[in-house]
Amino acid sequence: MDHKRISSFVACTPSLMFDKTTETYASANLSTSATPPFSDLSRWRLKVEHGAQTWHYLETDEQVVQWPQTKADKYHLGLPFESSSFPTPETPLESARIGYEYYKQLQTEDGHWAGEYGGPMFLLPGLIITYYITETPIPERMRVEIIRYLLHRANVDDGGWGIHIEGVSTVFGTALNYVTLRILGLSADHPAMIKARATLHRYGGAVGAPAWGKFWLSAMGVYDWEGVNPIPPELWFAIALLKVYKYKSIARLLTLFSTLLLNRRALPHLLPVHPGRWWVHTRMVYLPMGYIYARRLTPKLTTFTAQLREELYVEPYENIIWTQHRNNVAEVDLFLPHSKLMDFVNQFLGLYEKIPFDYNRLRKHALDVTIDLIRREDENTFFLDLGPVNKALNWLVVYYHYGRESREFKEHVRRNADFMWIGPEGMMMNGTNGSQLWDTAFIAQAVCETGLAENEENRESVLKILEFLDDCQIKRNVPEYEKCYRQTSKGAWPFSTRDQGYTVSDCTAEGLKTAIYLQNLSFTPQTINKERLEDAVDVLLTMQNSDGGFASYEPARGPSWLELLNPAEVFGSYLACNIMIEYSYPECTTAVLLGLSTFRKYFPDYRTEEIEATAQKAVRYIKNAQREDGSWFGSWAICFTYAGMFALESLASVGETYEN
């Protein structure tokens, strides 16, 4: 199949264009008071390249013939397909063999297994709002399938949306997804909009949205920035602050002290509130948010946004006293109230925000630092960014800073497709650009541990897995990674793809374990050499926390009291569900212990003492993390089941079993 030729056809797919006459998006065949016709699912194709997953719609019969739909395409779309027929298994191993025979039908041509990574309902709104602000055409098939997805995911009882697909309707979910559907072409008198609006008004209107909702509505021009708590970019450059006010000697001393004593980036380890010490997802979201907030960036008021101002609130927009709503969060949305410290900080920063922008030298320097960090994030991840939230935010910053004709803007638009996934319910935005490495590693381990990998009929599939694993390993540290507040990455494996490029502790451990398993089969080449396996070990040995546990992306950098400064009212609180700093997790720790145990079984002479010391500390953490009832609390999957499976397997890998 000629994917390049087909992709050129797909690029000509009709798009939902920004109509400057009506000041909104328009499609010639769209009846906004009715649900638009959806796409023909038999014309969708999944293209994979170096793990990247992008869906393409074929407009002509000629394209359909040239690029046939695969079994995997049909499976993901919920379409019937002719699977191979299998006998009824008589043993567990036979059942596993048949299971892998079925799975092979779904393996992608580059060796991994694709799949959706959905759930959150606050991802699509940021993306579509940015499409609107930047006046970027939305592909027509993408538009109608997002509409289908959002209509399908509206809660049946009240027509609203929650923070995730199983959540009750909230102001956050309902307001943002309402705006999204209006941008995509549904009119205010569409039955779904009438029902959702009634729910939103019953909760008091969009003034009760939590912080992230207030931000996106302000960026859209349908909420006032005066109603948003401060998001200061100045936190990113404490040393620059000292230099501006001529305290250069103090700045030099602090820089020297932190460099010599801590071998770390300038102030993050001296000032606990510096974003470099926050959890990576939190800091990468608030980085572009700070830039947009500091400049109060909002598109011009249009007829469309004026209509939204009328629809989203229960009182006239011009009568709302916005400052009174900075901390107004609807009860249904309020998962974690602000601490008294956070309220005090917001009041103080509110005074600082009264300094006119033209006279605020600190802010101008802060924005320079912010833009540099956003540029680094974009370039280091090939414009995928850490995840979908900061992807949309960075794209919006690029629009304002570089313009629509810039390379940076065009790259952001191009890579939006990596996050979009279409299934039986429509098109969603994935929680990352996929879970390619993670899913494929476990499939590979299963086929190896059952012995099925050596079967002749499975060898081609297994070799493709190894090729993918080889391609997916991160083979560099990003340039000046410490200036980006990044963890070392050379030798790591990511959660998704090499381009995304973020080190993840358990993904690195599973990638390491899988590579060793595969390369110890009788027929596989040594594609990933010993030096690269050692690189993976080197990364893992930098990531252990003081309590012996391992966090997700990097070691914990900040104190736990930073949770008192959590500004997002919808994330946080119980056990390991906090968002301001990294924490040790049973699943990450047990995965690393398994990876290191597997490595030293085959390579006992490399960093032997350090691996042993790391393993002992990890075991102590795992035992300490066990709860009174014998369980382990997991944060990254099906909670107790997931954590318990990992904990028991990892302890067995170092000789600790039920028998002893």
Image (tube, grey):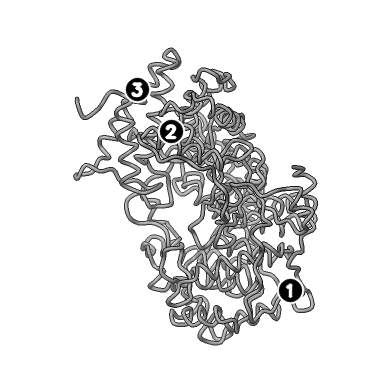
Mark seen at residue 613: 3
Tag 3 or tag 2, which sits nearer the N-term? 2
Dot 3 crowding, Cα within 10 Å, few <14, some 14–19, many 20+: few
Q: Secondary structure at mark 3?
A: helix
Mark toward the start of the polypeptide (2 vs 1): 1
Q: Quadrant of residue 626?
A: top left
Q: Nearer the viewer, mark 2 or mark 3?
A: 2
| Residue 481 in the image, given as x and y percentages of width and height | 59, 35
The residue drawn where x is 56% and y is 87% is 316
Residue 53 as seen in the image, left or right of residue 213: right
The residue carrying mark 1 is 26
Near mark 2 (Cα within 10 A), the count class, few <14, some 14-19 or many ≥20, is: some
Tell me which residue sits at (60%, 29%) in the image.
467
User: In what quadrant of the picture does the C terminus appear?
Assistant: top left
Q: Nearer the viewer, residue 558 or 353?
A: 558
Viewer can see residue 473:
no
Amino acid of disc 2: Ala
Task: Estimate the x, y position of residue 426 in percent, counting from the top left.
Answer: 58, 62
Task: Check disc 1 and report its element: helix, strand or loop.
Answer: strand
Q: CA distance from mark 2 to mark 3?
A: 29 Å
Q: Identify whether 326 is placed above or below 634.
A: below
Label 2 or label 1, whichever lies nearer to me, is 2
Distance from Cα at disc 1 to Cα at disc 3:
63 Å
Which of 603/251 is in front?
Answer: 603
Q: Quick one: label 1 or label 3, which is nearer the N terminus?
A: 1
Circle 3: residue type: Ala
When the figure is inspected, residue 394 is found, relative to residue 448, above or below; the finding is: below
Drawn side of residue 61 relative to residue 151, left or right: right
Residue bearing the label numbered 2: 446
Q: Give, as a three-letter code, the residue at label 1.
A: Ala
Q: Which mark is residue 408?
A: none
